[in-house]
Amino acid sequence: MYEKRGAPQLTGKSTVRLFSFNMFDHPIPRVFQNRFSTQYRCFSVSMLAGPNDRSDVEKGGKIIMPPSALDQLSRLNITYPMLFKLTNKNSDRMTHCGVLEFVADEGICYLPHWMMQNLLLEEGGLVQVESVNLQVATYSKFQPQSPDFLDITNPKAVLENALRNFACLTTGDVIAINYNEKIYELRVMETKPDKAVSIIECDMNVDFDAPLGYKEPERSAQHEEATDVEADHSGYVSDIGFRAFSGSGNRLDGKKKGVEPSPSPIKPGDIRRGIPNYDFKIGRITFIRNSRPLVKKVEEDESGSRFIAFSGEGQSLRKKGRKP
């Protein structure tokens, strides 16, 4: 008696379990729900074998994975670009990255040095790699880890050019950028709309926080002490040439009221330059305002210089004692 069997019919929810044998030195990737998840031993880029210099990997936020990872990812229905979540289970540290190439040895992945520092990983440490989908970034805030970053003329343009080698950002990470043969570290203080965002083909607003260890320059006192005596700046305008209505006047009645000179205002072009200030002190700036020559007051008790009207002697054509 033969029992007729057809193709199995799956109705409702079903669970598929995959059994594998660890026949190789590297772990076999686990595939579930269209998700890539596996463990690799990580090394820095300087350990990558080959004649070519791969210092470009250190300048970005992408890793190098083995070819078997590409084979597994091509069979999954994942979104592009490929983004991954890296986790160090020993220290409970996490970050996100992209992939640059699939040329590493099996069971090994190569990470930038700054990324290994964020994950607290040593050479040959185990890292969990999982495929993720991240939202597109709209805002990010960075804090330079050294005041030397302020020496850059246009920091936003430098950062924009450096972020072209990055695929995503994670809040709390300290990224490293290379500019003028110098490494600058920046901490990611905030990202929107999520703590981990994708920065590929996005319009992102960038803001900077005060650098770590930066101190505001101390401001000097705004006003000098009241006991200080203002310097006499009359010497600066002592020889300015002709000035209209600068003389004193005389009254017919001999009074001195209203005869003080009222000279015209001094123009900037009339001031003689090059007269040294002998009272100059190092570290002190003196501003000269409304400097005019001091007018000497005429003392009223000086009879010799007082003008007396009709005080002269007259002359007569006739001589006394002579008959016409």
Image: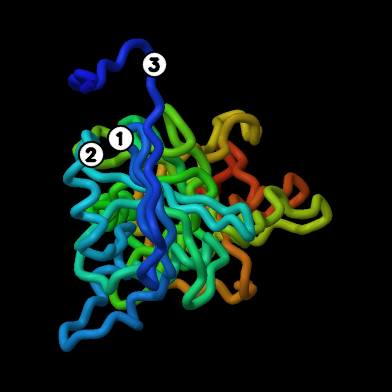
Left or right: 44 in relation to 234: left
The residue at the far right in this view is 227
Which element is circle 3 on?
Answer: loop
Nearer-the-camera pick, 143 or 280: 143
As measured in the structure, the alpha-carbon distance from the residue carrying label 2 to the one carrying label 1 is: 5 Å
- Mark 2, mark 3: which one is toward the viewer? 3
Nearer-the-camera pick, 49 or 304: 49
The residue at the far front in this view is 1
Residue at x-position 23% and y-position 20%: 3
* Residue of label 1: 34
Q: Is residue 315 visible?
A: no
Nearer-the-camera pick, 143 or 175: 175
Residue 230 location, x and y as percent?
69, 56
Which element is circle 1 on?
Answer: loop
Coloration mode: rainbow
Q: Is mark 3 in CB contact (under 8 Å) with mark 1?
A: no
Tag 3 or tag 2, which sits nearer the N-term? Answer: 3
The residue at the far bottom in this view is 51
The amino acid sitting under disc 1 is: Asn
Residue 44 location, x and y as percent?
39, 75
Q: Looking at the rendered structure, which numbered label has been put on residue 76?
A: 2
The amino acid sitting under disc 3 is: Lys
Residue 137 location, x and y as percent?
34, 33
Tag 1 or tag 3, which sits nearer the N-term? Answer: 3
Q: Looking at the rendered structure, which numbered label has been put on residue 288?
A: none
Name the image quarter holding residue 69.
bottom left
- Quarter in which the N terminus is drawn: top left
Tag 1 or tag 2, which sits nearer the N-term? Answer: 1
The amino acid sitting under disc 2 is: Leu
* Residue of label 3: 13
